[in-house]
Image (spheres, grey):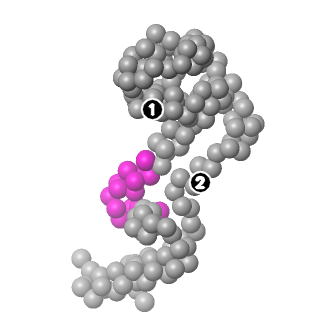
Amino acid sequence: MMPENCSRKSVSRLFDCLSKEIEKQQPKNVIHFMVDFLCKNYGSHLRGFAHVWDVDLELEKEKKLVIEFFKSQKLTTEIAKHFISVGFDSMESLLYLNAHVLDDIEKFNNVNWLPGHKIRLQQMFSNIQENIKTFYAEYDKDDVKCGLDYSALRQQASYTILSPFQQL
């Protein structure tokens, strides 16, 4: 165990470093920024919390990808959200769907899709594996990526790493 004055110095150094980064980055949400900073630079001290914190970012990226997939199939964001709300919130989960579950998803969301949208959904899910493969091929060519800004999901920043446990 460290002596008490060493712990205070470490905490003081950490707060100084955080203050400088906050002044430099000017984040919109300071608390969110602080947690990001701690997870990025001191993840090993947080006993697994950093991994849990970053999982949300990955899930959000997957959901955005699902929305982009639906848009590439000429379907609305709202329809994509109906699938996400039922738990089909990743590209992988869409592979397990077929046209027979569309009525259940529609009922669960308490909506009535337009006939044209329903036909598009039936066509999309009748050949879902090929449609996803085509989507990824276009995505890799950067045809779809240009409309996405995944980095905006969480404010990215360059941090100055200063260990709070270093001696002055």
Q: Examine the residues drawn in magenta and state their main secondary structure.
A: helix
Residue at (52%, 80%) from the top-left corner? 23
Local SS, label 2: helix
Can residue 162 be seen by looking at this rendering?
no
Pick the quarter of the image with the C terminus.
Answer: bottom left
Residue at (56%, 78%) from the top-left corner? 24
For disc 1, the neighbor class at 10 Å (few under 14, some 14 to 19, many from 20) is some
The dot on residue 55 is none
Looking at the image, residue 33 lies above or below residue 95: below
Residue type pointed to by label 2: Ser
Relative side of 115 to 147, left or right: left
Pick the quarter of the image with the N terminus.
Answer: bottom left
Gap between marks 1 and 2, in whole Å?
Answer: 21 Å
Q: In this picture, which residue range is highlighted in magenta? A: 40-56
In the rendered image, residue 42 lying in the magenta stretch gets the answer yes
Relative side of 158 to 101, left or right: right
Q: Residue tagged by mark 1? A: 84
The tally of labels here is 2
Give coordinates of residue 39: x percent, y percent: 42, 62
Q: Nearer the viewer, residue 8 or 125?
A: 125
Can residue 167 be seen by looking at this rendering?
yes
Local SS, label 1: helix
The dot on residue 151 is 2
Give coordinates of residue 107: x percent, y percent: 38, 19
Looking at the image, residue 118 lies above or below residue 82: above
For disc 2, the neighbor class at 10 Å (few under 14, some 14 to 19, many from 20) is few
Give coordinates of residue 36: x percent, y percent: 45, 63
Front tag of 1 and 2: 1
Q: Quadrant of residue 114?
A: top right
Looking at the image, residue 119 lies above or below residue 8: above
Between discs 1 and 2, the one toward the N terminus: 1
